[in-house]
């Protein structure tokens, strides 16, 4: 039985496409332009929480070179286990290492896999259909949008520089998705309102290996339900009697909570908390009011525009999510 592996993919792909250029890879690593690479353990650790979302579904990985894509490897190896209907992977015609893929591709292609043909538990390379695209494989092109329309769930690591456009397209076509993005994306004016309105939320895990040499925080962004999203954040701190630990902002009617673990259980006004709060956010327990320093909706609420939050005799806090507790009737002890 011929199981899919990188060497097998190289054999089944046309020789003019997706051929690795070692010197280009080295140059990309030296410039730290490896935002497009996702480790298999990170994919496995996250995808295990969504098994029920994939049965009889078409999965699209539309920012992935199958020659190196661990998304392609994961879904092809687990096709039967997940009960997939079809897997589609798009290989971008890459002339810019900073954009989509590790490799230079002379022609854009897409792969379709709809299950093994001879009964093995893992696919044969003969089962993979390789087709050419007329254009360059850009997810915004008409032919790639047609592939998107076929998909039920999109799972990939889109280019960070195009994250806003990528998410906008997914929302426009009402697609389910699980994608990786820069942690700073939660503050984007195009992304934060989606988080606030519960159209997007964070995944279960935080990729550990991804970008480990670069440093910036990355998140899984999704609109697929998972158990962690409904877990209640246990609160043990009290505001009453400890007001000095929760200073009020000079220019906004809210208190400063410097750590998520310090959110008081007896306070129902607006609180400014670190962005990492989104990792614990349960929409049944909290309401997201706004975000600082990018206040997008504050004028709509008739509130004064405060700019950067300020605390008397203290350094201005870093970006804060402004939240409010729900469940006023909760018994406080």
Image (tube, rainbow, N blue to C red):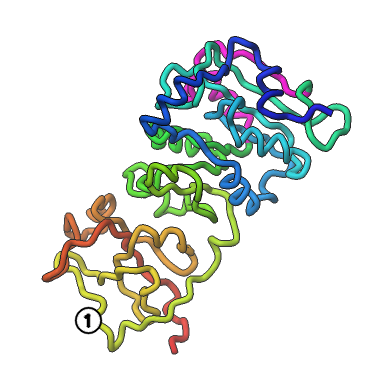
- Which residue appears at 54% of the width and 25% of the height? 145
Residue 147 falls in image quadrant: top right
* Observer-nearest of 310 and 189: 310
In this view, which residue lies farthest toward the left? 313
Residue 106 position, x and y percent, is 53, 11
Residue 121 position, x and y percent, is 83, 37
Left or right: 168 as drawn, with respect to 80? left
Residue 124 position, x and y percent, is 79, 27
Left or right: 221 as drawn, with respect to 49? left
* Observer-nearest of 7 and 303: 7
Q: Secondary structure at mark 1?
A: helix
- Which residue appears at 55% of the width and 12% of the height? 107
Find disc 1 in the rendering and name its residue: 244
Residue 253 falls in image quadrant: bottom left
Q: Is residue 166 above or below residue 309?
A: above
User: Per the image, is 145 magenta?
Assistant: yes
Image quadrant holding the C terminus, namely bottom left
- Magenta segment boundaries in residue numbering: 127-151
Q: Is residue 112 above or below residue 221?
A: above
- Which residue appears at 64% of the width and 33% of the height? 72
Image quadrant holding the N terminus, namely top right
In this view, which residue lies farthest toward the right? 119
Residue 57 position, x and y percent, is 69, 39
* Observer-nearest of 1 and 270: 1
- Which residue appears at 68% of the width and 44% of the height? 54
Left or right: 320 as drawn, with respect to 170? left
Q: Is residue 305 visible?
A: no
Residue 117 falls in image quadrant: top right
Left or right: 251 as drawn, with respect to 65? left
User: Per the image, is 215 magenta?
Assistant: no
């Amino acid at each position: 039985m011929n199981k899919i592996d990188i060497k097998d993919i190289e054999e089944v792909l046309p020789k003019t496409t997706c051929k690795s250029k070692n010197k280009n890879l080295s140059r990309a690593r030296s410039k730290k332009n490896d935002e497009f690479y996702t480790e298999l353990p990170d994919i496995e650790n996250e995808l295990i929480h969504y098994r029920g979302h994939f049965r009889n579904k078409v999965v699209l990985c539309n920012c992935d070179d199958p020659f190196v894509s661990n998304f392609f490897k994961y879904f092809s190896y687990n096709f039967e286990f997940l009960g997939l209907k079809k897997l589609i992977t798009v290989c971008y015609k890459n002339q810019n290492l900073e954009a989509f893929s590790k490799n230079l591709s002379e022609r854009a292609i897409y792969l379709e896999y709809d299950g093994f043909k001879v009964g093995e538990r893992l696919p044969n390379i003969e089962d993979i259909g390789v087709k050419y695209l007329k254009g360059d494989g850009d997810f915004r092109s008409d032919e790639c949008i047609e592939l998107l329309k076929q998909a039920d769930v999109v799972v990939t690591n889109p280019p960070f520089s195009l994250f806003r456009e990528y998410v906008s397209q997914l929302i426009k076509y009402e697609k389910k998705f699980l994608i990786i993005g820069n942690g700073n994306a939660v503050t984007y004016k195009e992304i934060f309102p989606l988080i606030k309105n519960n159209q997007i939320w964070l995944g279960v895990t935080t990729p550990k290996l991804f970008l480990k040499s670069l440093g910036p925080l990355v998140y899984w962004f999704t609109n697929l339900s998972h158990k962690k999203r409904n877990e209640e954040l246990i609160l043990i701190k009290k505001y009453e009697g400890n007001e000095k630990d929760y200073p009020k902002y000079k220019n906004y009617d809210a208190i400063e909570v410097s750590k998520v673990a310090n959110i008081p259980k007896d306070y129902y006004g607006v609180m400014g908390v670190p962005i990492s709060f989104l990792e614990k956010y349960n929409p049944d327990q909290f309401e997201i009011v706004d975000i600082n320093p990018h206040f997008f909706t504050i004028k709509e609420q008739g509130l004064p525009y405060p700019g950067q939050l300020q605390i008397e005799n203290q350094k201005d806090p870093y970006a804060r999510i402004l939240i409010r507790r729900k469940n006023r009737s909760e018994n406080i002890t």
